[in-house]
């Protein structure tokens, strides 16, 4: 069995074990793979931490907190798998470049496209948006009737669904555009950016509404605002890499890696921590109690009956 020192001496052999095709000359190197392994380590560590937190949170007294702990657990687990594949130089295809800003001595002008990261985005974004939705709303029973509360819950759910669907269109637009050789890729890029801007407008609308109430946590709102800045950087990175072929795949990996670690690793963890502080754990019980109270009505008296007790 190889010792630790022997394993360290070998270094990162992912590119040697899983080499790119000979028909691809613009591809990931060991330098980019090294950074991707570092990002994988961050995601894997956070996933293990949140697994421990999930297991340590009692479901009997802190059921809501336990549920929302799944958000950073799932996002970090998804991206641990994603970046393991990415760093191993797997989960990719290739396409001829439209622009020749980056070229090699081989002159093939074929770029490596890692579709695995788009799969990670598609699976991870709904959980991130769930944390964002909770941060911009308060989960407390402060309504006179259950119908008012149910209306609010429905509005939150419909808002979340709209954001998830638009951001998934954004991801699919970038994926399809990355696989197209001709200038038509920019049509899909336009669709993607339009969907992202619509999703951002929905989030901004939620932020504006949340600022009008005292129940929402301002620290969570600040994180969501920072998250919007990160979101804007994704299409910029795409335009420099898969779209415009302006930067090497190693630089692309570093750019996307930083964005993903922040957006899918750190921010969901921070938002979940803030969201679960002082969370109303009796929310579901109060909802059921409010519902049952509305069903209790005074039994009508029969004709001739009085409210006096017979002696």
Image (cartoon, helix red, strand yellow):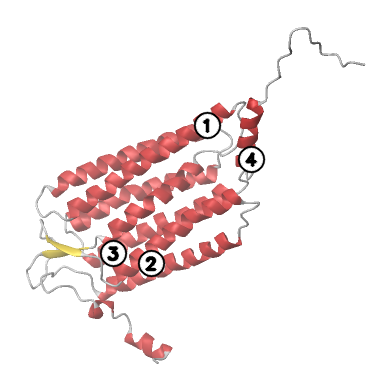
**Marks 4 and 1 in Cβ contact (< 8 Å):** no
Sequence-first disc among 4 and 1: 1
Q: Quadrant of residue 113?
A: bottom left
As drawn, 23 above or below 234? below
On the image, the x and y values in percent for residue 38 come to 38, 70
Residue most extreme to the top: 304
Q: Of marks 3 and 4, which one's residue comes earlier in the chain?
A: 3
- Percent from the top left, x then y, of residue 85? 31, 68
In space, the residues marked 3 and 1 are separated at their CA atoms by: 44 Å
Chain-order first, disc 2 or disc 3: 2
- The residue wearing badge 1 is 150
Badge 3 crowding class, 10 Å Cα cut-off, few under 14, some 14 to 19, many 20 or more, is many
Pick the front one: 17 or 231: 17
Instruction: Give the Cα distance between marks 1 and 2.
Output: 41 Å
Q: Which residue is mark 2?
A: 39
Say which residue appears at 23% left-offset and 47% top-offset: 173
Ranked by sequence position, the earlier of labels 3 and 1 is 1
Residue closer to the observer: 256 or 185: 185
Determine the image quadrant of residue 77.
bottom left
Real-space Cα separation, disc 2 to disc 4, in angstroms: 41 Å
| Secondary structure category for the residue under label 4 | helix
Q: 31 above or below 124?
A: below
Is residue 104 toward the left or the right of residue 295 in the image? left
Image vertical order of residue 143 relative to residue 9, above or below: above
Q: CA distance from mark 4 to mark 1?
A: 14 Å
**x, y percentage for residue 302?**
73, 11
Outermost residue on the right side: it is 311
Residue under the image location 24 percent in, 60 percent down: 115
């Amino acid at each position: 069995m190889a010792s630790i020192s022997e394993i360290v001496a070998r270094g990162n052999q992912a590119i040697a074990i899983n080499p790119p095709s000979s028909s691809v000359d613009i591809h990931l190197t060991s330098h980019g793979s090294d950074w991707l392994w570092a990002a994988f380590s961050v995601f894997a560590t956070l996933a293990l931490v949140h697994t421990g937190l999930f297991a340590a949170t009692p479901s009997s007294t802190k059921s809501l907190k336990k549920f929302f702990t799944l958000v950073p657990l799932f996002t970090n687990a998804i991206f641990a798998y994603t970046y393991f594949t990415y760093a191993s130089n797997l989960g990719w295809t290739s396409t001829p470049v439209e622009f020749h800003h980056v070229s090699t001595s081989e002159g093939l002008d074929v770029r490596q496209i890692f579709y695995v990261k788009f799969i990670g985005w598609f699976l991870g974004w709904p959980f991130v948006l769930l944390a964002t939705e909770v941060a911009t709303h308060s989960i407390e029973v402060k309504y006179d009737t259950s119908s008012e509360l149910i209306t609010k819950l429905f509005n939150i759910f419909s808002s979340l669904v709209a954001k998830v669907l638009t951001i998934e269109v954004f991801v699919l637009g970038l994926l399809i555009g990355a696989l197209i050789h001709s200038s038509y890729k920019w049509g899909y890029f336009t669709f993607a950016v339009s969907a992202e801007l619509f999703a951002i407008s929905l989030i901004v609308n939620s932020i504006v509404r949340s600022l009008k109430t005292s129940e929402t946590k301002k620290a969570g709102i600040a994180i969501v605002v920072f998250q919007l800045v990160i979101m804007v950087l994704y299409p910029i990175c795409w335009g420099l890499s898969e779209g415009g072929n302006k930067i090497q795949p190693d630089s692309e990996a570093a750019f996307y890696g930083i964005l993903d670690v922040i957006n899918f690793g750190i921010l969901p963890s921070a938002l979940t921590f803030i969201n679960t502080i002082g969370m109303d754990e009796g929310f579901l019980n109060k909802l059921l109690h409010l519902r049952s109270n509305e069903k209790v009505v005074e039994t009508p008296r029969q004709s001739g009956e009085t409210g006096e007790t017979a002696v």
